[in-house]
Image (cartoon, coloured by chain):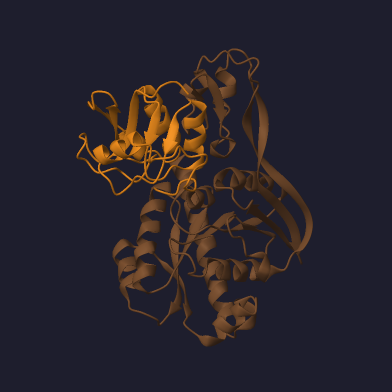
Chain colours: A brown, B orange
Amino acid sequence: MIFAIASGKGGTGKTTVSASLATLWENDVTAVDLDVEEPNLHLFLNPEITGTEKGYVTVPEADEERCVKCGACRDICQFKAITLMAGTLLVFPEMCHGCGGCMAVCPEKALIPGRRELGEIVRGRSGNMEFLMGRLRIGEAMAPPLMRQVKERMGFIATGDVIIDAPPGVSCPAMNAVMDADAVVLVTEPTPFGFHDFKLAWEAFSPLGIPMGAVINRAGLGDSTVQNFCKEKGIPIWAEIPYDRAIAEAYSQGRVIADAVPGLRDTFLKLKEHMVAAAEENDMLGVFRA
Amino acid sequence: MSAVKKVAVTSEGPTLESRVDARFGRAGGFAVVDLETMEVEYVDNGGSQSMAQGAGIQAAENVANAGAQVLLSGYVGPKAFAALQAAGIGVGQDVDGLTVGEAVEKYKRGEVPMAASANAQAGGNK
């Protein structure tokens, strides 16, 4: 089963939760860092890196000799990656989303497939755990194409469960990270910012129909707005992680808090039970629906 | 470059008294001014404003389609600059803070140099 650890707001503790879950997971598990813009799960899991490969997106390269200036490529491109200005064919490869439309419609085969580097896909192992992460090239703006390639590898190597450390926010990268999950963990903190972005995330992910539960990190800080909202909307609170200096210290040393801080192992084991139960229940409902 | 007949100015409105819009790609529109008659034709650029990306390139196409040989604006990004250059359109930058009429008069006096490169970063004026 696939579990995504997500949040609207950045810095709420997605990686902290992901690292703890992956570490105490007893079944076969693959930890996947899909926060490709700033992956940091490896800092906690310390995997031994076994392979790194580059990810690319196919972009058009212009063969000016063959171009008849018909403008078909310009007309089909939705992203202004290719245009004709006064008879000059201009390609902006960094704008290209790699759909291949321009190359398909060119009647003269004047556009040939080139490639733009998206970043790298890193594979490793940590004990019995498989590890996978994407790292976007500095300057690259498009995360989802690289994320898709990481997920493709995930399909090949994952034998047991998968824990995805998702990027923050509610836009395409975040959506991409949670859309294939069997259950989503929304990590938040009980502050006005935490609540604001938690609500956004809940609204954005709800239409996916995937079971969701909340983890309230830094519980004891702020107020009870998040808890009240969860109650009102029927969002189960699967775990509360206390606002505690010992946790912050362990985190700052790159340690996995479920191991480093007494009492937290049980918190995460219970969280795991809730996640698995929610995913299994949803699975059974799916069988009934089908 | 052939003789300049029409100058496009990024503009917040349709008249010579309208303020220059400092942005190029996401400008509200273009006041296309006939240098001889000083008549203004307004080209809406609203479509570019709502684009997720490529607003500067779309705006450059709009300027070319309007038949202008020179563009005056505040800040022009690198891709828009490349597109304007490919179309043979001269680019005068840093005329923000003026009205459209003032910018055109300044250009006519030869006080707006044609730029050799972009003066803004990609996506900088969203």
Residue A204 vs residue A112: left or right?
left
Point out residue B67 in the picture as x, y percentages from the top left corner.
36, 22
Give the vertical position of A83 relative to A26 (above or below): above
Residue A278 vs residue B11: left or right?
right
Residue A217 visible? The answer is yes
Q: Depth check: give the residue in front, A222 or A137.
A: A137
Point out residue B61 in the picture as x, y percentages from the top left corner.
42, 27
Give the vertical position of A27 relative to A246 (above or below): above
At horizontal 63% and vertical 20% (from top left) the residue drawn is A64
Taking the view exactly as shown, the residue that stands out farthest to the right is: A50
At horizontal 48% and vertical 37% (from top left) the residue drawn is B81
Image quadrant containing the N terminus of chain A: bottom right
Q: How many marks?
A: 0
Give the vertical position of A250 relative to A53 (above or below): below
User: Residue A129, located in which quarter of the rendered image?
Assistant: bottom right
Residue A158 visible? The answer is no
Q: Depth check: give the residue in front, A85 or A6.
A: A85
User: Residue A69, located in which quarter of the rendered image?
Assistant: top right
Q: Depth check: give the residue in front, B100 or A265.
A: B100
Point out residue A257 in the picture as x, y percentages from the top left corner.
60, 78
Residue A117 vs residue A170: left or right?
right
Q: Depth check: give the residue in front, B117 or B63.
A: B117
Point out residue A266 in the picture as x, y percentages from the top left corner.
56, 78
